[in-house]
Image (tube, rainbow, N blue to C red):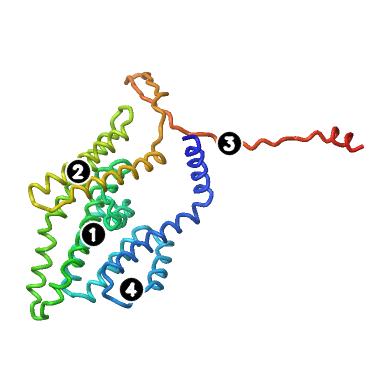
Amino acid sequence: MTTLLVAKQYMKLIYGKYEAYITPLLKFLLAFIALMLINSNLGYMEGIDKLTVVLIVALMCSFMPMNFIVIMAALFTLLHLYAFSLECAVVVAAAFLLMFLLYFRFSPKDTVVVILTPICFLLKIPYVIPISMGLIGTPASAVSVSCGVIAYYMIHYVGENVTLLSGMADEETATKFKIIIDGILNNKEMVVTIVAFAVTLMLVYLIRRMSIDYAWTIAMVAGALVNIMVLLIGDLMFDTNVSLLSAILGTIVSFLITVVLQFFVFHVDYSRTENVQFEDDEYYYYVKAVPKVALAKPEKQVKQINVQKRSRNTR
């Protein structure tokens, strides 16, 4: 544990010293991964389905605000869908516009969540998002998480129905619109996932705010269990075909990831908790102080050599 704490301290020092270089690099990697995943899952427009284009756009994103990454990811998605089907592009564009209005209104600072949620779905660890945002976010973060879930399921729906949509004639525009809209709005799995993520996020947030020992650990465990329960209840009620094994394994992996997050964000020593009471002219104050676990940077010991003694021996 001491080695991990020392490594954590060094990582903080390195990030603080080279933040001007590390932040753009992280933005570049996030944009690159997001755009590559969009191209690999859609890839209908050959002009932007190229590594050079992705590298140039990701490089632009590294020097722009975080919201620019969301805009470019949405633009790539719409261009691919336009090359595949105009109707798909119009429906998804309307959905994106509505999500952006909600996102910028309620949780404009949760840009990373909107991008990471679809990525985590593709990596089979989506449950890390609601638990993590319950720990470090606010109840409004449920909006950005829901936007990420909707974005993933819209792309997933198009990918699963390529044969059906491409096989329809151009004259069947109205029918295409109806099929796409009904397919997205009536996606019970998407609705159940949004509810499960929102409930999990709220529960984790409420528990980790409590003045109890090991609040973050209890919140993570409770969030993981509630997430599985809501998904299974939703499967029983709406027949969403949720894989129990996949949900359990994904939740376990997500829990382990949040444990790492807790170590870097909220690592405290409950054995040294102090309860302090004081007052002023108007109030009595009862304060519970829990110290953070931190180690001082190990100092280098310099061994001095007796020069005079060495010079005598040489004589």
Q: Give the mark, 3 or 4, whose residue is nearer the N terminus.
A: 4
Identified by mark 2, the residue type is Ile
Disc 2 crowd rating (10 Å Cα; few below 14, some 14-19, many 20+) is some
Q: Quadrant of residue 201?
A: top left
Q: CA distance from mark 3 to mark 1?
A: 46 Å
Q: Give the mark, 4 or 1, whose residue is nearer the N terminus.
A: 4
Q: CA distance from mark 4 to mark 2?
A: 37 Å
Q: CA distance from mark 4 to mark 1?
A: 19 Å
Q: Residue drawn 26% across and 55% down?
A: 121
Tag 1, which secondary structure?
A: helix
Q: Residue drawn 25% across and 54% down?
A: 103
Disc 4 crowd rating (10 Å Cα; few below 14, some 14-19, many 20+) is some
Q: Which mark is residue 228?
A: 2
Disc 3 crowd rating (10 Å Cα; few below 14, some 14-19, many 20+) is few
Foreground residue among 225 and 277 = 225
Tag 3, which secondary structure?
A: loop
Q: Position of residue 223 (x, y in %)?
A: 24, 39
Residue at the disc numbered 4: 49
Q: Residue drawn 50% across and 56% down?
A: 21
Q: Nearer the viewer, mark 1 or mark 2?
A: 2
Q: Quadrant of the C terminus?
A: top right
Foreground residue among 177 and 302 = 302
Q: Give the mark, 3 or 1, whose residue is nearer the N terminus.
A: 1
Q: Residue drawn 22% across and 55% down?
A: 149
Q: CA distance from mark 1 to mark 2?
A: 20 Å
Q: Position of residue 285 (x, y in %)?
A: 34, 21
Q: Which mark is residue 50?
A: none
Identified by mark 1, the residue type is Tyr
Q: Give the mark, 4 or 2, whose residue is nearer the N terminus.
A: 4
